[in-house]
Amino acid sequence: MTPFTPSQRFFLHVEPTDMRKSFDGLCGVVSRELGRNPTSGDVFVFLNRRRTHIKLLAWDRNGFVLYYKRLEKGTFEAPRLTAGGALSWPNLMLMLEGVSLRTARFRKRYELPNKVA
């Protein structure tokens, strides 16, 4: 279970990330490579080259939160991204649980129109 909610926005950094990076190093990646503000409240998702490690970085009112998961077996599947590198909440949850996003079928649901950031 993650401390993140569907009301947050999620952005995947598509290039492999050095998992030795912590808060400051990942904030630099967010600023320089994604062109986003790390303190915006959005969640930024990073994978290592072998896709066996994942880190999620977010600003939580008064400090950064880092969620880190290492798989003992298998890999994370990198999902297809929507415009702007955004990752949907359902895709993130399926990715964390090891469900293949290529074979998952999503039934139609109503969605509010996206807000322009």
Image (tube, rainbow, N blue to C red):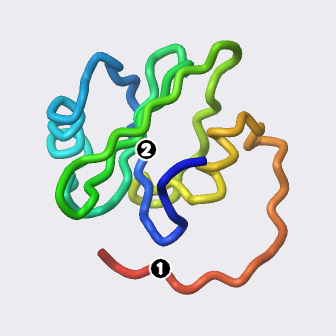
Residue 60 is situated, as x and y percent measured from the top left of the image, at 28, 58
Relative to 101, 21 lies left or right: left
- For image coordinates 31% across by 46% down, the residue present is 65
Instruction: List the residue tagged with mark 1.
Output: 114
> Who is closer to the viewer here, 114 or 5?
5
Instruction: List the residue tagged with mark 2.
Output: 12
Residue 29 is situated, as x and y percent measured from the top left of the image, at 22, 36
- For image coordinates 44% across by 55% down, the residue present is 10
Q: Which mark is residue 18?
A: none
Q: Is residue 87 above or below residue 98?
A: below
Q: CA distance from mark 2 to mark 1?
A: 18 Å
As shown in the figure, which amino acid type bears the numbered disc 2? Answer: Leu
> Who is closer to the viewer here, 6 or 114?
6
Quarter residue 62 falls in: bottom left
Quarter residue 42 falls in: bottom left
Question: Which quadrant does the C terminus fall into?
Answer: bottom left
- For image coordinates 46% across by 60% down, the residue present is 83
Relative to 103, 110 lies left or right: left
As shown in the figure, which amino acid type bears the numbered disc 1? Answer: Asn
Relative to 104, 67 lies left or right: left
Q: Secondary structure at mark 2?
A: strand
Residue 25 is situated, as x and y percent measured from the top left of the image, at 18, 29
Q: Is residue 24 visible?
A: yes
